[in-house]
Image (cartoon, rainbow, N blue to C red):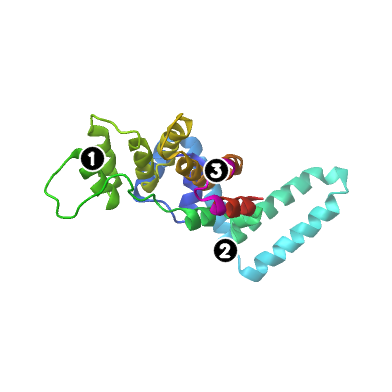
Amino acid sequence: MDKQQLLYLYFSDKLTPEQEHVFKDLLNTDSEFKAQFEFENNIKQVIKAEQSDTLKSKLQGFEKKIKTEQNNAKSWFNWRIAASIVFFLAAGWFGYDAFFGVNYEDLYATNYKNYPNTVYTITRGEDTSSLEREAFVAYETEDYNLAIQKFNKIENKQPYFNFYKANSYLGLGELDKAKDLFKIETAADVAEFKAEANWYLALINLKQHNKTEATKYLETLIANYNYKKEEAKTLLESLN
């Protein structure tokens, strides 16, 4: 997972247990990551120490200072410092996404739903057993780690396995692994879940705050498929 995304999730209190393990490991092994964490954490502590009215007052003061000093070439350095302070205070108070006008996390949460099993019928109480049945039982019960293990063990691979493995990784929050498998689906000449893969790739890029890539997949979906077409249009409007 992207390190900046991990930091974002940490400060948003949205880390999964698995992501939290990766986060702690990076703090212990990656000095650059630790320095960035401490920097952002210090900023957050400063922001939390401020009351609402005091913070808003400071923001207004900094904004006035910037406007005044923009016309003064000799104060260029001071203006940059003031602008940076406004950015961090505003981001901390209003939220990083809201500050830029797009709340990626909310858009993702509103639109994400793991894809249902539409390819393998599971009869309740059925005595027969197979790896594929076990994989889809695990998938339907959201035991995604087990589902992936079962899919990987099946010798006779079906073309739709990659799509359901991708959704399993997405359910676990392993975005990059999910992305790689969804891309295989979109690149195939013939694929059962090509439209759906474009939708999930758009959502993954939203989750990773990659507006350009998210837009690309949404436009592809709208231009070529009916699946989630109206939702894609609404989502695209939210990004513009």
Q: Position of residue 13 (x, y in %)?
A: 45, 56
Tell me the kind of residue under disc 2: Ala
Give the quarter of the image for residue 57: bottom right
The foreground one among 127 and 75 is: 127
Q: Position of residue 211 (x, y in %)?
A: 60, 44
**Residue 63 colored magenta?**
no
Tell me the kind of residue under disc 1: Glu
Farthest left residue in view: 127
Kindly report which numbered mark, 1 or 2, lies closer to the viewer in this rendering.
1
Magenta-tinted stretch: 223-231
| Residue ID for mark 1 | 132
Residue found at x 65% / y 52%: 100
Residue found at x 38% / y 39%: 163
The foreground one among 160 and 89 is: 160
Q: Position of residue 46 (x, y in %)?
A: 58, 58
| Mark 1 or 3, nearer chain start | 1
| Mark 1 or 2, nearer chain start | 2
